[in-house]
Amino acid sequence: MKKVMILTGAGQIGMAIARRMGYGMKIVIGDKKPENAQNISNIMNQAGFDTLALEMDLSSRESIRGLIAQAQQYGEITMLVNAAGVSPSQAPVEAILKVDLYGTAVLLEEVGKVIAPGGVGVTISSQSGHRMPALTPWEDEQLACTPTEELLKLPLLQPENIRDTLHAYQLAKRCNEKRVMAESVKWGEKGARINSISPGIIVTPLAIDEFNGPRGDFYKNMFAKCPAGRPGTADEVANVAELLMSDKGAFITGADFLIDGGATASYYYGPLKP
């Protein structure tokens, strides 16, 4: 039996973290598109990792439980890397809420039930959650603590209160951060830790599509005018994950780490101010 890492969302950021932290482990990769999971699995296996590709739909509790059950056949689950989700230009409001908001909450809950003592998780959120004006303490608490099956019924998340797909995405990512805080208390009872990372613009195949798409100029302007003056790389996100998931991060749980080259700072107090 091996220690097991679950990686959900077969993309560049998830793979970079899995490569950094998953050596010697069984890595079970779940993605809604089986070919994506298989592609990342092949790359990693050819680099000496031990991975298995599975189909998994983050918006389905049944699908998440199925992935966990298969992962448990190889040993104790000691790591979770959640990099699954859909972006504002990829999906309608309803799908963004079902996948990014509800799905992430269910995944953290279900893995939290089985995570081994000493285990650790990271979920990939987004700088978008930091751009939205503050919610009320009551709304934050609702996002953090509402039972998962009732989350999508919150007044805050009803269609008439959501302006567009970007607003839905921002709400989903705000919910991810609050959920991580609430779940960290439960994970802590098992001697495990969970944190979130909020990347800015990271160069991935998906991001390159965005750069060349209708919102391309918006993104190019964002990284040109942020203090770093460039987009980031998946490996830079993995640097933060390595801290959070290693013993060096033993005192860090329930936290969110913004890694965006200063874009959010520039949005509030610099040339990106709307």
Image (cartoon, rainbow, N blue to C red):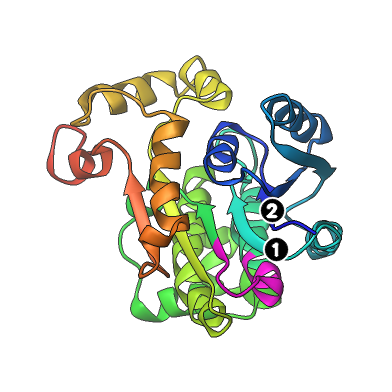
The residue where tag 2 is placed is 6
Queried whether the magenta region covers residue 112, the answer comes back as: yes
Image: 62 above or below 272: below
Query: Which residue does the image show at 35% across and 79% down from the upper left?
Result: 137
Give neighbour class at mark 2: few <14, some 14-19, many 20+ (Cα, 10 Å): many
Q: Secondary structure at mark 2?
A: strand
Residue under pointer 1: 77
What residue do we see at 38% from left, 47% from top?
240
Residue 109 percent coordinates (x, y): 65, 72
The image quadrant where one finds the N terminus is: bottom right
Along the line of sight, the residue nearer the viewer: 77 or 65:
77
In depth, the one of 159 and 134 nearer the eye is 134
The front one of 188 and 196 is 188
Q: What's the distance in space between the residues labelled 2 and 1, CA to CA?
A: 7 Å
The kind of residue tagged 2 is Ile
Instruction: Give the vertical position of 175 relative to 154 (above or below).
Output: above
Q: Which mark is residue 153?
A: none
Task: List the single residue furthest toward the bottom.
Answer: 189
Q: Is residue 249 above or below residue 137?
A: above
Q: Which is more N-terminal, label 1 or label 2?
A: 2
Front residue (pair 219, 164):
219
Is the C-beta separation of discs 2 and 1 under 8 Å?
Answer: yes
Q: Position of residue 45 (x, y in %)?
A: 74, 30
* Residue found farthest to the top: 212
Q: Is residue 272 left or right of residue 237?
A: left
Residues drawn in magenta: 108-120
